[in-house]
Amino acid sequence: DLEMVSAPEEAGFVLNTGPWRDEERREDYDRVLELCAGRGLAMVCANPDLEVIRGGKRIICAGTLAAHYETLGGDVYYHGKPHAPAYEACLALIGAAGEGDGPRVLVVGDTLRTDIAGAEAAGLDSVLVTSGIHAEELGLDFAEQPDPARLTEICEREGHLPVAAIPTFIW
């Protein structure tokens, strides 16, 4: 059983799922992160993404807070993409954990650093949704096709290459 506490002095560890409100900045968490790091509390980061796009707006995510916590000397344990256990659990759930005649899997994501990197590490093909995290860098408005040369340049710089790219994905 876990009990949520509001003071670092009462905590046994830090569970980081990201900011409470979309408008918050990393600096809004500096004081509490400094207190937690000073107490030697380990942090569990439930989503290593640095940023997400929510409602068309770029906001910080748990990975930004975790990266700052590490600079303060705190220990961080990352869970989720791009780390292998996230993919292993999903593959096992659909019966695709081994090679052979199991289901074919394609990872769809909007972030090279986590989604596409995780797919590569798991040996899976991936498709990049270009209207997400990288849209501004690609100079795109929603649903626009990227310039192939610019997309290739960004993928090569980041060291992750999806098998395809699509402008949007609606589930």
Image: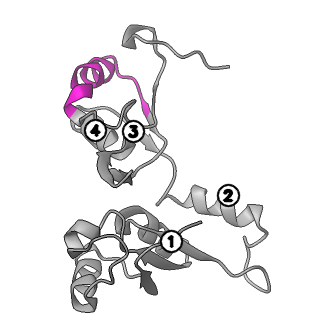
Q: Is residue 8 magenta?
A: no
Which quadrant, please, contains the C terminus? bottom right
Q: Which residue is mark 3?
A: 76
Which quadrant, please, contains the N terminus? top right
Residue 32 lies left or right of residue 9; in this view the side is left
Q: For the residues marked 1 and 4, what is the alpha-carbon distance in whole angstroms? A: 33 Å
Sooner in the amino-acid sequence: mark 3 or mark 2: 3
Q: For the residues marked 4 and 2, what is the alpha-carbon distance in whole angstroms? A: 27 Å
Q: Which residue is mark 2?
A: 89
Sooner in the amino-acid sequence: mark 3 or mark 4: 4
Give the SS element for disc 2: helix
Q: Which residue is mark 4?
A: 70
Residue 81: give x, y in percent of width and height: 49, 58
User: Does the CB distance between marks 3 and 4 fall below 8 Å?
Assistant: yes
Toward which corner of the image does residue 164 lie, by quadrant?
bottom left
Dot in front, 2 or 1: 1
Q: Residue at x 27, y 83 (%)?
A: 151
Sooner in the amino-acid sequence: mark 1 or mark 4: 4
Give the SS element for disc 3: strand
Kind of residue sitting beneath label 2 = Ala
What range of the chain is rendered magenta? 27-43
Q: For the residues marked 3 and 1, what is the alpha-carbon distance in whole angstroms? A: 31 Å
Kind of residue sitting beneath label 1 = Phe
